[in-house]
Image (tube, rainbow, N blue to C red):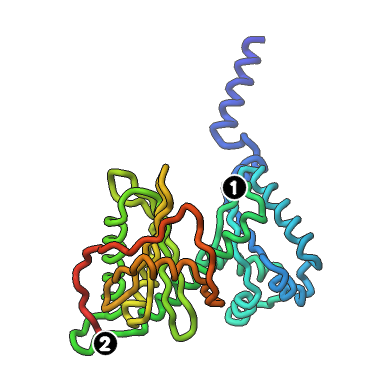
Amino acid sequence: MAQQENTKHNSSKHKRKHGTTPHGPTLRRTLRREAPSTVGLLVDKQDFAAMRRYRTFPFDDHTAYLHQVEGLLKALAAQGMHTTIALFDPEDYAEFCAESGLDADTGASRSRFTAEIASAGATIAYTGQRLTDVIPLLVSRAVRQATWEYATLLLADLGACADCGQDIGRAAFDRASHLLMRLLETAGPGAHHLVCSTPTENDQLLAVLHTHRDTTGPARLDTSEGAEFATVLAVAIALESPGGVVLRTSAPDSPDRVHGWRLAHGTLAPLTAGEVFNAYCTDAETGEPVSPESGVEYSAGFDIAADPAERHH
């Protein structure tokens, strides 16, 4: 009996050594859990309606579609899989299929497009959030990315300075980065919310940046948000357009403070307290007054002591 049990033990060791256990299906399930998934999401009814023209698109109700997507996301999360949600744009999809020579009316083409946008488009990692919470974040991220791409193209098209040969877009971005760093250094401790806006020929560019600074150490900020903010500010510098920056600072046991600056001659010129109040308490679309917030101090912009800027025409 002892001999027989020892033989069985050696046989089991031999199988494990040569990979016959665990079985193939088990290994494939393990690999499947480690393979990331991407779900392309049609966030609004207009986009959903545009996809209904394809015969192979299986849904006819947007609410039911969102319910099914949320169920899929929960199922993938329950399997321990990392899942990314990407914004599915029907117009971009049609262009992608036309340029790639794909039949747009197939699930395989939709899957391939989803993989493409996951690598370069606006995405959010799914961690169990409600889909109603994910959608506004995804849309906001898509708007941010589109703004950054458009601003980057504007800077790239400016070319070189006729006088000194310096790349105008690069010089403007360097200047904007310097102004941003000086602004954050001078703002002091607290949670900071910055907004930069500037008009262009085709659109109003807007960038938002959130940072936090302790009583000691530099401000902590998201690298991508910082780059987007600096790019929009650089457009205002390069085009000498009437850009502006607003800073709102929150700190414990004190009212929020709002400061503002206008862009003038390549630097940020402080606004007066009255100008900050008017800018913050006026509806940007209608021009009508907006009631000031309670517990908020509207203050003049402070001097950020930035070096003088070189101007390129």
Q: Residue at x 19, y 88 (%)?
A: 163
Q: Which kind of residue does numbered mark 1 sit on?
A: Thr
Q: Quadrant of residue 19?
A: top right
- In the image, is residue 133 above or below residue 165? above
Q: Quadrant of the N terminus?
A: top right
The total of numbered circles placed on residues is 2
Question: Alpha-carbon distance for marks 2 and 1?
Answer: 49 Å
Toward the bottom, the furthest residue is 162
Q: Which mark is residue 127?
A: 1
The secondary element bearing badge 2 is classed as loop
Nearer-the-camera pick, 288 or 112: 288
Choose between 304 and 117: the one closer to the eye: 304
Q: Could you tell me which secondary element the residue under label 1 belongs to?
A: loop
Answer few, some or many: residues within 10 Å of disc 1's Cα (few below 14, many 20 plus, some between 14 and 19).
few
Name the residue: 53% across, 64% down: 291
Residue drawn 22% across the image and 66% down it? 306
Residue beneath disc 2: 313
Judged from this view, the residue extending furthest toward the right is: 60
Residue 68 in the figure: left or right of residue 73 = right
Percent x, y of residue 82: 58, 49
In percent of width and height, residue 52 lies at 76, 73
Q: Residues within 10 Å of mark 2 (few under 14, many from 20)?
A: few
Task: Look at the picture and state if 154 lies above or below 219.
Answer: below
Cβ atoms at labels 2 and 1 below 8 Å apart: no
Q: Based on the displayed image, in which of its 4 quarters is residue 13 positioned?
A: top right
Residue 224 at least partly seen: no
